[in-house]
Amino acid sequence: MTTLPRGRPRDPALDRAIAAATVGLLMEIGYRAMSLELVARRAGVARASIYRRWRTKAHLVYETVFTELGPRSVPDHGDLETDLIALIDALRTELSAPAAAAAINGVLADFAADEAFRAHVRDRFLAPTAAALRQVLHRAARRGEVAADAPADLLVQAIGGTVFFRAVVLGVPLDETETGNLVRIVLDGVRSRGRPAQAGAARLTASE
Amino acid sequence: MTTLPRGRPRDPALDRAIAAATVGLLMEIGYRAMSLELVARRAGVARASIYRRWRTKAHLVYETVFTELGPRSVPDHGDLETDLIALIDALRTELSAPAAAAAINGVLADFAADEAFRAHVRDRFLAPTAAALRQVLHRAARRGEVAADAPADLLVQAIGGTVFFRAVVLGVPLDETETGNLVRIVLDGVRSRGRPAQAGAARLTASE
Amino acid sequence: MTTLPRGRPRDPALDRAIAAATVGLLMEIGYRAMSLELVARRAGVARASIYRRWRTKAHLVYETVFTELGPRSVPDHGDLETDLIALIDALRTELSAPAAAAAINGVLADFAADEAFRAHVRDRFLAPTAAALRQVLHRAARRGEVAADAPADLLVQAIGGTVFFRAVVLGVPLDETETGNLVRIVLDGVRSRGRPAQAGAARLTASE
Amino acid sequence: MTTLPRGRPRDPALDRAIAAATVGLLMEIGYRAMSLELVARRAGVARASIYRRWRTKAHLVYETVFTELGPRSVPDHGDLETDLIALIDALRTELSAPAAAAAINGVLADFAADEAFRAHVRDRFLAPTAAALRQVLHRAARRGEVAADAPADLLVQAIGGTVFFRAVVLGVPLDETETGNLVRIVLDGVRSRGRPAQAGAARLTASE
DNA sequence: CCTTAATCGAGACGGTACGTCAGGTCTTGTG
DNA sequence: CACAAGACCTGACGTACCGTCTCGATTAAGG
C-alpha cells in the first residue's frame, strides 16, 4: 500500500526536459562546465524544480545518465565466447555513450567521499553484472567448457575495468577486434583444462 | 643556452610545503573539498606562490601526486609470472596510495575536455608501461613461455584497468590472492600454446 | 444587492488562527523575518488560504495589526489639557503595542511606492485624528482657552510624529511625564494670547 | 598607532561607484526593489566587492545614505527662532532627500531587531542634535529669551518626529510656512515666561 | 440524491534574492 | 624577481521566499 500522493503532482514533462537538457549539456560542455543554472535555462525550468528532484548536481547526473545500469538480460547463445562478447558489448555501449563518458569521472569525483554511493554502485551495477556472468559461466560449465568455480567478481572487474579504462580514461572505446582479444584473454583464464586457484603451485603442471 | 635567472630565486622550501599540504588535504578531505586557499593556508604560503608554480589546481595535484608514473625499472626474475606480478604490484602501489586514489577522479574530471592531457597520460604513463611489458614478454618468448606477439597495449589496459577499477572506483585495492588470479587469467591468454589473433576462428582449433 | 455566496464558505476559525499567528510572529521575530510560510505553518493552515484573504504580506499585517486606527471617540473632559493627553495616550497605546511597533516600519517600507496606501493612511488615520483634535480645540476656543484657528493638521502631525518617533524609531514609548511635557509644549503654541500665523512678523509683538 | 595595511588596498573608485549606484537605485526603484545584484551591475563591480565592505544590504544603505547625520555646526544667529529654523531645515533637508526618504523605512525595518543599531542611531544622530539644541537654548537663555532647563531631548524628538513623519511617512516634507508654525509652537513651549516642568500646575499661573 | 462551486491542505511551479565560496588574476609593500 | 597579503571579477552553490497554480478531498447550497 503506497502513501497516497498529496498536493500538486510533479509535472513529468519537467522530468523529461531536465533529463534532456542534462544529457545534452554533458555532451556539449562536459560535467564540470555544466551548471544547474544552465540546465534549468535550457530545460525552460526553474532552478528550484531541479533541486526539488535531486539533492545535488552529482545526483542529477548519476540518476539521469545511469538509469539502467547493469545487464538487462543474461545472454544465452549456447556458446561462452558469444555470451561474453554480448556482456562486454552491453558494458561498452553503456560506458562509451558520449553523455556517460562525459559524466562518469565528475560523478565519481563528487561522490568520492560518499561511502553510501560506492555501496550503491556495487549493489546496483557490479553485483547484477557479476551474477549474470556467473550464470553464463555456470551454463558453460554444464557444457564442459569451463570450470564452474571461476572468480566471477574478479572477472567482472577485469572486464569492467578494461572497458572503463578505454572508454572513460582514454576516451577511445574498444573496437570489435579488441573486444574479441579481450574475450579470448579472459576465456583462457577460465578454461576447464585448469583453473585459477588459491593453490597456484599446482596450476600449470596440470594443464601442460 | 638557458635564460639565466634574474631576481630573487624561488624558495624550494615552499615547493615542499605546498606539496605536503596538497597531499595531506587530498587524503583528509578529498579533491573537490580541497581549495587552493586551504592549501596555501596550511602551507603557510601565499596563494599567488602556488599559481606561480602551477597553472591550475588540477595541474598542482597531478604533478604533485603522480610525479613518477610508469615503471621505474623493468622486472627480470627469469619467470614471466613473477615479472607480471611485479608490474602489477607497482601499478597497484601507485594507484592505491591514499592521496592518489583521492586525486585521480578529480584530475580526470577537470581534464576531461583536455585532449592534450590524455595524450600526455598516454605518452608518460601507458607507453612506458606497455614497453616494459613488451620487454618482459619478449624475454619470456625467448624462454619459450609465450608467443612474442601478444597484444601488449590491450594487456596493459586490461591490467591497468582492473587495478584502476579496484583502487579508484571501488576503493578496495587488489589483495595478493586477487593479484595472483589476475596474473593467471592474463597469462593464460598469452601462453605459447596458442595466441589471441585477428583471425579468431583458427585460434582455438589450434590449441585443442 | 449582494451576490449570494456559493460554494463552501470560508472557515472563520482560519481567520482567527492566521491573525494570532501573525501577531505572535511579529512580536517574536519581527516583520522581515516573518514569512507567510511560517505564518501558515504556525496557524496550521495552507499558504493559499492566506493569499485567498490578503493579497500580500504587507496587507495581511496592516489589516491584522492596525484594524482600528484613529480615535474611537473624541474626548471631552471640559479641559483642553486633559483632552489632549487623552488623545496622545490613545495614539501612544496604539503605536507602542509590541506587534504594532514591530510591524509598522516593515509595512511602510513595503508600501513605500504605493501612493494609494498613503492616501488610505491619510484618510483612515490622520484625517479622523485631525478632525477629533479640531473638535477638541473648537470646544476649548468656546471656553476661551485657545484661538480657534490653530493649525490642526500640523499639530496632529507634530503629536503623531513625536509619539511615532519614540515608539517606533527609538523603541521607547513616551512615559507620563514626557506626555505631560509634550502637551504643554504644544498647548503653549495654541494658547489664545497669540497664535501661529502666516504673518509671522506680527506674532510675537502681539503677545509680549 | 594604526596597524599598517597589508595586501592590495581597496580601490576607492569602487567605493564611489557603489555609493553612486546605491543612491541612484534607491531613488529610482526604492529600497525593497534594490538588490545587491543590481547595485553591483550598475556600479560595474563584483557582488563580492560589496559584501567585502558591508555585511548586509541594510548596512550598505545606512552608511551610504546617512553618512553625515546630525548637525554639522551649531547655528548662531543671535535669535532663537532663526536658530531653530536653521536646525529644522538641516533635519528636513537630510530626511527629505529622495534617497533618504526612499531608504529610511527599509533600513529601520531591516534593523528592527537590532538593538545595537538603535543605540548607534541615538548616539550618532540624536545626541549631537540634542546637544546642539541645548547650546542654542543656552545662548537664548543668556539673552533672556527662554528658560535654560527646557527638556532638550523631548524637544529634539518632537521636532525630529514631526519632520520625520512628514518627510518619511507622509512623503510630503514641511514647507516654509509649516516650518515657521512648528518653530512657534515649540518656541512657545520654552519661553522664559514659564516652562514645562514636572509640576504642571504652577506653570501657567507664573506667566499670566 | 446529485450537481455545482468555492474552500481547504498540500505541495509543485517560475522567479528572484540571498550570503557564501572557489577559481584565477592583479596590485600593493617588503625582502 | 619572489613573497605575503588581500582586493578583484566571475560565476556557481544551495536555501528561502514570493505569489500562482494544480491536485484530491471537503463542505455547503440548489436542483
Image (cartoon, coloured by chain):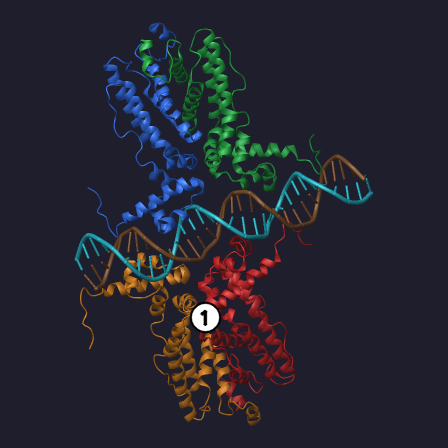
Chain colours: A red, B orange, C green, D blue, E cyan, F brown
Asked if residue C129 can be seen in this view, the reply is yes
State the residue at coordinates (31%, 66%): B54
State the residue at coordinates (51%, 69%): A99
Q: In the image, residue D32 lies at what x, y percent?
A: 45, 41
Quarter of the rendering containing residue D95 = top left
Asked if residue C172 can be seen in this view, the reply is no
Instruction: Say if A131 sits above or below F15 in the image.
Output: below
Q: Which residue is mark 1?
A: B167
Q: In the image, residue B107 lies at what x, y percent?
A: 40, 67
The total of numbered circles placed on residues is 1
Instruction: Say if B178 sits above or below C70 in the image.
Output: below
User: Mark 1: which secondary structure?
Assistant: helix
Instruction: Say if A85 sits above or below C52 in the image.
Output: below
Q: Quadrant of the N terminus of chain A?
A: bottom right
Along the line of sight, the residue nearer the viewer: B180 or C175 = C175
Q: In the image, residue C156 lies at what x, y percent?
A: 44, 21
State the residue at coordinates (46%, 12%): C82
**Amino acid under disc 1:** Ala
Density class for disc 1 (Cα within 10 Å; few <14, some 14-19, many ≥20) is many
Q: In the image, residue A107 lies at what x, y percent?
A: 48, 64
